[in-house]
Amino acid sequence: MPALSAGSGNDTGLYELLVTLPAQLQPHVDSQEDCVFLQDMFGERSLHSLVKIHERLQKYEDQSPAPVLDSAGTLAHELAEELQSKAVSAEIRELLKLLAKPHVKGLLSVHDTVAQKSYDPELPPLPEDIDDDEDSVKIIRLVKNKEPLGATIKRDERTGAIVVARIMRGGAADRSGLIHVGDELREVNGIPVDDRKPEEIIHILAQSQGAITFKIIPAIKEETPSKEPKMFVRVLFDYDPNEDRAIPCKEAGLAFKKGDILQIMSQDDATWWQARHHGDANPRAGLIPSKQFQERRFALRRPVALVQPQKISNRRSYDVAVECEDADYGAYISGFHIAGLRRSFRLSRRDRKTNKSMYECKKSDQYDMADVPTYEEVAPYRRQPGARHRLVVLVGPTGVGLNELKRKLLISDPQHFSVTIPHTTRPKRSQESDGVEYHFISKHLFETDIHNNKFIEHGEYKGNYYGTSLDSVRSVLSKNKVCLLDVQPHTIKHLRTAEFKPFVVFVKPPPLARLRETRRNAKIISGKDDKGSAKPFTEEDFQEMISSAQMIEHQYGHLFEKVIVNDDLAAAFSELKMALKRLETETHWVPITWTHS
């Protein structure tokens, strides 16, 4: 390309050159599209503004300006003091207000720094009493405000020296980059630490404010800075470091509650991880027990914890058959039939006395208490438009109101919510249709499907099988509907897959006194006869509902994403519907395996 003419003289500015550039380039551009592109690019107003600013700054720099004085901040302070003694007027008040603004003070401070060319940091002088043979000694000064230093120390068992045990990610020591794991600590603020216990040194550090000077001997191996990890976990238990006798430093511990999301900052220590709460503005990490360490601690208590569930099992509190074998399994709502209500395969207490049918689910033995709940690695997930809905799983004790909540959801939006159609080996009645009330199949086929693990749960009642299949859930989800599923809690793990991404809601009863009040006129379904008669709640029903809810929450609470107390049905329904709305529009944390499928 031939050289471009910038004008007849050497005084042509960059801005003038930019304005004439499109016209000079036009003869060398082949297509109209390229010409329009160049005109748009060089005609951009922001580019013109930047070039004008550049020219002004260049002209100003060529003049080699010098500051009138290098103490504008001091002058402003003196002016403010003098104005205070003058007669107060509106102008003086306004000027004093301006001079007191932190932005103005900051601007004057920057002016003075530039004017004095005082750019280098002021380093403390080296102590005069350093031994000649201490070639590797480092003198470090850190500014400590109210936050902890962010490091732990210990006594080396071999040498007896006080060394840095760990650096907390994001803390003051970590941000400085001057202190490393393994560094030997010799002095703190001029106080020798050789003959002091680590607890005494920690006390000295805790009492120190402002600048702290360390005299250390660096470790032989320097730590290489690592990138901030992006591992997030949902914690499945409560933790208070102040109650943990094993933690090396309680002050460095991080407290959390079950359900919190933590970002794991370091797993270098096999026993104590470093973590911070997700979204916390404080960048400093805290100590938490590692997954392996916490699992071992829980395992020591596990035999005791298993005693109570076994007693409950002997009382058949989790034995289930069909809650109501035939009577009004479906419901006619607003002129259309809804199948699947009251088909949760649960047996009330009074029915368990006369019915020996046991509930079963796919490989249930391997799921009950199989995992020790500590941490679950999670990732953010948001349902994309057109994607299948997440399965909504409702759990709770018998009589708590699961069917009422399901029924209200179905009535509120039958095009959006749906329930599964169960399978049975019972003969079809004259008024029934296959695939409406039930999927009617042979006993041989039902047993084959049981063997092939096709049922989420199944039971036998009066010689007939009843069950909820995985395919029935898939059928609802394939129609772009939200599938509402009421199951026993020990089936949840069977459903926790990337395919279903279940959102588990635990519905629990209110306290006993409130339970008596709210259920005074309510009735509980009995399956002792074919009519599925409803009988008033008894005190024994209330006691069982409370104890069953406590056991469910204790054993499976780490799997729940939402807990609703059904004190008032209308309020519980409103809370549930709002949660399901947010489920479709907001980002939620789910097991990381669900996002990698």
Image: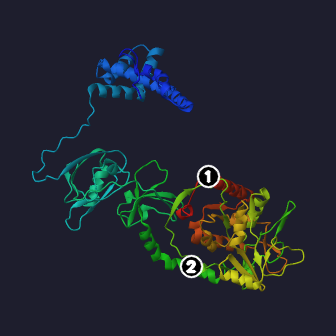
Q: Quadrant of the C terminus?
A: bottom right
Under circle 1, the secondary element is loop
379 or 317, nearer to the observer: 379
Residue at the limit of the structure toward the right, as seen here: 430
- Does any portion of residue 589 appear in the rendered image? yes
47 or 473, nearer to the observer: 47
Under circle 2, the secondary element is helix
Count of marks placed on residues: 2
Check disc 2 and report the residue beneath it. Answer: 366
Q: From this view, report whether residue 160 is shown above or below residue 111.
A: below
Check disc 1 and report the residue beneath it. Answer: 586
Q: From this view, report whether residue 499 is shown above or below residue 361.
A: above
Horizontal placement of 376 versus 73: left or right?
right
Circle on res. 323: none
Horizontal placement of 351 versus 117: left or right?
right
233 or 317, nearer to the observer: 233
Q: From this view, report whether residue 8 is shown above or below residue 187.
A: above
226 or 506, nearer to the observer: 226
Q: Give, as a three-letter code, the residue at label 2.
A: Gln
The Cα atoms of the two marked residues, 1 and 2, are separated by 33 Å
At x 78%, y 56%, the residue is 412
- Does any portion of residue 354 appear in the rendered image? no
Q: Earlier in the sequence, mark 1 or mark 2?
A: 2
The image shows residue 253 at horizontal and vertical percentages of 40, 59
The image shows residue 389 at horizontal and vertical percentages of 67, 59
Tell me where residue 534 sits by quadrant. bottom right
The image shows residue 276 at horizontal and vertical percentages of 44, 55
Residue count near mark 1 (Cα–Cα under 10 Å), binned few <14, some 14–19, many ≥20: few
Q: In which quarter of the image is the N terminus?
A: top left
Q: Give, as a three-letter code, the residue at label 1.
A: Glu
Residue count near mark 2 (Cα–Cα under 10 Å), binned few <14, some 14–19, many ≥20: few
Horizontal placement of 484 versus 153: left or right?
right
